[in-house]
Amino acid sequence: MLTHLYALGYLGVFLITFVESIGIPVPSAIAFLTAIAILESESATPLTPYLLFATLVIGQLSGSLVGYGIGIRGSGWLLTKIKSSIKFQKTYATVQRISKKYGIFAVILARLCGYIRP
């Protein structure tokens, strides 16, 4: 997988961070390792560290926005499918309580904790 990402260069780094940010369980460390490998290589097309960093950030942000959009659009459908689950109802009530109590800080903390994120 690393060789394919390495061959894609900037696009490979962008894609792996984009996919990971949407919520698909892909280790984002692969993107960072690929970026470092690309920087350290002596290929015919050298990539700049600043542009690689920008690619990582843009991939992360755009993936997060797409994931947010999917969550907003699909939350109604998902809620109708799993609303009858007792475990879901307890978890949903806990999330709502924490969200009301801590507001945006709960969202930031959840984003930083890898286990909590999808």
Image: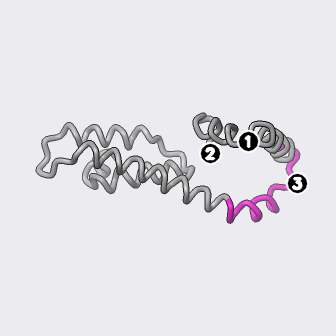
Dominant SS in magenta: helix
Viewer-proximal residue among 76 and 1: 76
Callouts 3 and 1 close, C-beta under 8 Å: no
The secondary element bearing badge 3 is classed as: loop
Instruction: Tell me if 25 is positioned left or right of 6 in this view.
Output: right
Viewer-proximal residue among 58 and 29: 58
Q: Amino acid at mark 1?
A: Gly
Quadrant where the C terminus sits is top right
Q: Earlier in the sequence, mark 3 or mark 1?
A: 3
Image point 30% across, 52% down: which residue?
4
Q: Measure how far apart labels 3 and 2 are at the Cα level.
A: 21 Å
Residue at the spot of label 2: 118
The secondary element bearing badge 1 is classed as: loop
Q: What range is drawn magenta here?
A: 72-87
Q: Measure how far apart labels 1 and 2 are at the Cα level.
A: 19 Å
- Percent across and percent down for residue 19 are 48, 53
Residue at the spot of label 1: 103
Residue at the spot of label 3: 84
Note whether 84 is above or below 40 in the view shown: below
The image quadrant of residue 107 is top right
Q: Is residue 103 magenta?
A: no
